[in-house]
Image: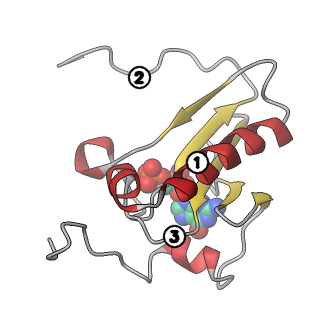
């Protein structure tokens, strides 16, 4: 952990490359704070990722390290993305994975928006050892 207390950010991660336009994505929404695009391997009828434009590795890093206007802008972009996808009436799920136990694959903070179908129970297992 660096002196600042924040984890190091890998500029080569796949979402950093998408933000720089080096890798294409199917964009849903973009503003000064965030980019939203369809997941390459959707796990629901609608599965979209929303990422902040700043270099934050996780929800904890973003929440501690980002300025308040970036945090507000990010969550407004999440809501605007769901609105553009037409999910507001039926509902949707927002999920973020952080670290090993959650299975975070890409070390750039992102939330998943799932919708377009009934989503079932929140977790596959329902408790320790399930
Ligand atoms: P995590 O497990 O880190 O919460 O989720 C990472 C997500 O990124 C996965 O759902 C995975 O399918 C998605 N993903 C990985 N690489 C790419 C890519 O190159 N493009 C897009 N659009 N999604 C990706």
- Left or right, 73 with respect to 1, comes to right
Q: Residue furthest front?
A: 68
The verdict on label 2 being within 8 Å of ligand 1 is: no
Mark with earlier residue (2, 1):
1
| Quarter of the figure that contains the N terminus | bottom left
Q: Nearer the viewer, mark 1 or mark 3?
A: 1
Image mark for residue 72: 1
Give the number of callouts: 3
* Image point (70%, 67%), residue name: 32
Q: Is residue 43 visible?
A: no
Q: Nearer the viewer, mark 3 or mark 2?
A: 3
Secondary-structure class at tag 2: loop
The location of residue 20, given as percent across then percent down, is: 63, 83
The location of residue 18, given as percent across then percent down, is: 62, 75
Q: Which residue is mark 2?
A: 123
Sort mark 1 into few (<14), some (14-19) or many (20+) by Cα contacts within 10 Å.
Answer: few
The location of residue 99, given as percent across then percent down, is: 28, 51
Secondary-structure class at tag 1: helix
The verdict on label 1 being within 8 Å of ligand 1 is: no
Task: Give the colour scheme of this rendering.
Answer: secondary structure
**11 or 105, which lies in front?**
11
Q: Which residue is mark 3?
A: 54
* Image point (63%, 39%), residue name: 113
């Amino acid at each position: 952990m660096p002196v600042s207390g924040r984890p190091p950010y890998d500029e080569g991660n796949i979402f950093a490359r998408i933000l720089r336009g080096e890798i294409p994505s199917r964009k849903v929404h973009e503003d000064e704070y965030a980019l939203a695009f369809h997941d390459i391997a959707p796990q629901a009828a609608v599965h979209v990722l929303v990422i902040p434009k700043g270099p934050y590795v996780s929800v904890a890093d973003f929440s501690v390290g980002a300025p308040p206007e970036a945090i507000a802008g990010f969550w407004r972009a999440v809501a605007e993305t769901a609105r553009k996808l037409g999910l507001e009436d039926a509902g949707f799920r927002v999920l973020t994975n952080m670290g090993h136990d959650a299975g975070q694959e890409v070390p750039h903070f992102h939330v998943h928006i799932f919708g377009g179908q009934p989503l079932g129970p929140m977790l596959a297992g329902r408790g320790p050892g399930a």
